Image: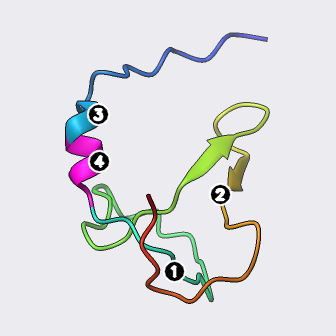
Amino acid sequence: MASEPAIDPEVISPDEFFRADIRVGLVVRAEEFPEARNPASEVLVLGVPVEGRTNVALIQPDREVPPGTSIF
């Protein structure tokens, strides 16, 4: 099995990352959109790769929190 290419951790600085306003949301539906070439500028879904880059586990709170709650 070929190894995945390393992700460059220097794409943005930690200071830039921590300036981002990241909040909890609720995904109610997801559909494939193969025509999309640029990611949406209004939504960020965090996940971790499992068994390569095609299988992703979404990161979620460990208990129920209201949508819009700030992540820190």
Q: Local crowd at mark 2 within 10 Å, few (<14), some, or many (≥20)?
A: few
Describe residue 16's horizontal placement relative to residue 59 as left or right: left
Mark 1 and mark 4: span between their CA atoms?
18 Å
Where is residue 40 drawn, in percent x and y?
A: 30, 67
Q: Are marks 4 and 3 in contact (CB under 8 Å)?
A: yes
Q: Local crowd at mark 1 within 10 Å, few (<14), some, or many (≥20)?
A: some
Type of amino acid under label 4? Phe
Type of amino acid under label 2? Ile
Describe residue 10's horizontal placement relative to residue 4 as left or right: left
User: Within the magenta stretch, is there residue 60?
Assistant: no
Give the SS element for disc 1.
Answer: loop
What residue is rendered at 52% in x and 15% in y?
A: 5
Q: Earlier in the sequence, mark 2 or mark 4?
A: 4
Q: Are marks 2 and 3 in contact (CB under 8 Å)?
A: no
Type of amino acid under label 3? Pro
Residue that numbered label 3 is attached to: 14
Foreground residue among 14 and 33: 14
**Chain part drawn in magenta:** 16-20
Quarter holding the N terminus? top right
Count of numbered tags: 4
Viewer-side label of 2, 3: 3
Q: Earlier in the sequence, mark 2 or mark 3?
A: 3
